[in-house]
Image (cartoon, helix red, strand yellow):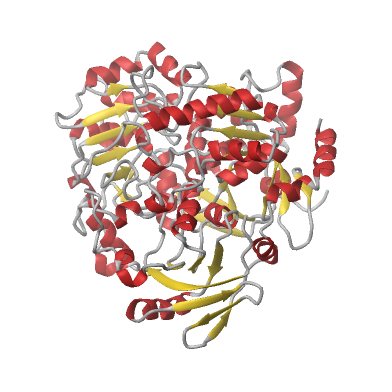
Amino acid sequence: MEAIRQHKGLVYALNRTNIDTDQIIPKQFLKRIERTGFGQFLFYHWRFNDDGTLNQEFSMNNPKYEGASILLTGENFGCGSSREHAPWALADYGFKVIIAPSFADIFYNNALKNGIILIKSDEEQINTWQAKAENEELHLEVDLEEQTIKDNDGTVVNFDIPSYHKEKLINGWDDIALTLLLEEKITTFENQKA
Amino acid sequence: MGKPKTIIEKVWEQHVVHREEGKPDLLYIDQHLVHEVTSPQAFEGLRLANRKVRRPDLTYATMDHNVPTKNREVVKDEISRQQMETLRKNCEEFGIKLADMFHPDQGIVHVIGPQLGLTQPGKTIVCGDSHTSTHGAFGAIAFGIGTSEVEHVLATQTIWQDRPKTMNVKVEGDLGPGVTAKDLILAIIAKFGVRFGTGYIMEYTGDAIRKLTMEERMTICNMSIEGGARAGLISPDDTTIEFLRGREYVPKGEEFEKVSQEWLALATDEGAEYDHTVVIDASEVEPQVTWGTNPSMGVPVSGATPRISESDNADEVKRALEYMGLEENQPITSIEIDHVFIGSCTNSRLSDLRKAAKIVEGRKVKDHVKAIVVPGSFSVKLQAEAEGIDKIFKEAGFEWRDSGCSMCLGMNDDIVPPGGRCASTSNRNFEGRQGNRARTHLVSPEMAAAAAVEGRFVDVRHYAGVLN
């Protein structure tokens, strides 16, 4: 996993609650056996019409959001299926940071494993940013080490993130390698159980 | 005697391999279930890092998500075929037992685990599928994981998990005649929403839960994730023990009696405290039908779709009604359907098929309705055929298929066409779930069967034979 300490980017605001992983990446794209190449299918049935042309009514297709790397969205983002294809699609498309009032449990872990910074923020703050993103153009600067977010105006807000998650993201640690350092304990546990 | 504990705390504590302040716990996993869709990248990761599967003996694989449910010999979809072939090769290379498409033990992973007795009280069970919560019906801590976590469990037989908060979902009173476990869990989610369980493991308690059969308990626990909880469970009791007795992977003879006592001792202690409790009165639950695009958007069959202006989440309701092609305040019994799906890890077990068959017996599926029954496993299919259930369905006009996930998520050919409307016994009514622009209404097997006959939703309790 790639280490990530800071990220500065353009914000795309998708103002919907309970966005499930079936919307993030529909099932017909889960048949690949690689981890890569899922970005083209992100929000597929929202982004594209049935004939494959761009759905101009879907906000993400507005040229002003081109190159967006920070997703601002509603409650319970990533609910539903455990498919890791969802964070693979988001990361492959270019999203490095997702800000929402809350995330679904399985999605949270899956995104973390892929180096995406998930930030829980209160709804009032999100509404403020959302208005800016929609009416003007919002760039945010996320500093994971300092746990701060700075917007275009220079306003800085703090955010919380479990220290363990922060440490993992900053160091880009491979979970399995870390766990295998504890292999002796696993073996002891197995022997006691047997 | 120490402080009274919930079963959640007991099972969790028994599996902590390593604990450090400020970090998640490293939990040991007793049973890892694997299927073709969420595992290929995990095995590839092992190969790249030159790692082995630590405990192939605690790992069991099957093919369910994209297997065809008819004409299985020819998988026309090249990518699906490749995904299944990849699983076969991976299982061979890493020494994992596999029930492939033609194996007598094949079936939906959450149907075969309990059927084989791999699912047992007190176990920690994971699978790269969110409906792993199903196995909680036995008093196991069972939850869905992503592919990176699948790889982690394959390599280490452990997983890092934040200690969950505990929730008591207390079901008071009794379910009325003709009201099912599916109606109860849909009513729970309609009442408390799709995220009330986030961060929690739920335990379902109360007399109404105790009276449920194991298959009904599986239906309840299966949909815990639709309320936001990764895991939901039920304390084991005699019903649990009797279900497991004699199954292939459970101990036999005296050993079984001994382990049964250990299992029963896992039940939540009298006076144990939960972090949170919610209460629902089962006697008030009616047969349920969802009208919207998430599982909490449901009402009793006697009800109607909501009025947008009276909803707290007006935007979401408006979007959902639009997607579903419904009016606000539209009576549920006025909704006409053109597809019926009886199947999925929620409702494809023998008792589900028996109950649905009882409704359709001697009746006919409405002309324009395409109705399919997909048994949860090959074994369920054979048992149903031995009882003549397949004939009842076929005579009524249903298609009788081979086992798999099928139209619950439409990864194979079993898809609802754009604009189609399906009465489905599955667990998710998300946009596009059963097919692009398909509209899904979640119901019990009995309600789905009645909808097939009527071509619209009706209160199945009015059918002869349901209320006795």
Residue A45 in view of the camera: yes
Image: A60 above or below B218: below
Q: Residue most toward the left?
A: B367
Q: Is residue B241 left or right of residue A8?
A: right
From the top left corner, tell me how far across and down residue B187 is, in percent. Answer: 40, 49
Residue at image coords 47%, 37% = B219
Residue at image x 38%, y 50%?
Answer: A41
Query: Quick check: A14 left or right of A143?
Result: left
Residue B215 appears left or right of A5: left
Quarter holding the C terminus of chain B?
Answer: top left
Front-lying residue, B460 or A34 = A34
Name the spot of residue B245 as percent of width and height, x first. 63, 21
Q: Is residue B114 visible?
A: no
Q: Is residue B358 left or right of residue A156?
A: left
Residue A91 percent location from the top left of the image: 49, 57
Residue shown at 68% from the left, 41% from the top? B49
Residue at 38%, 14% in the rendered image: B385
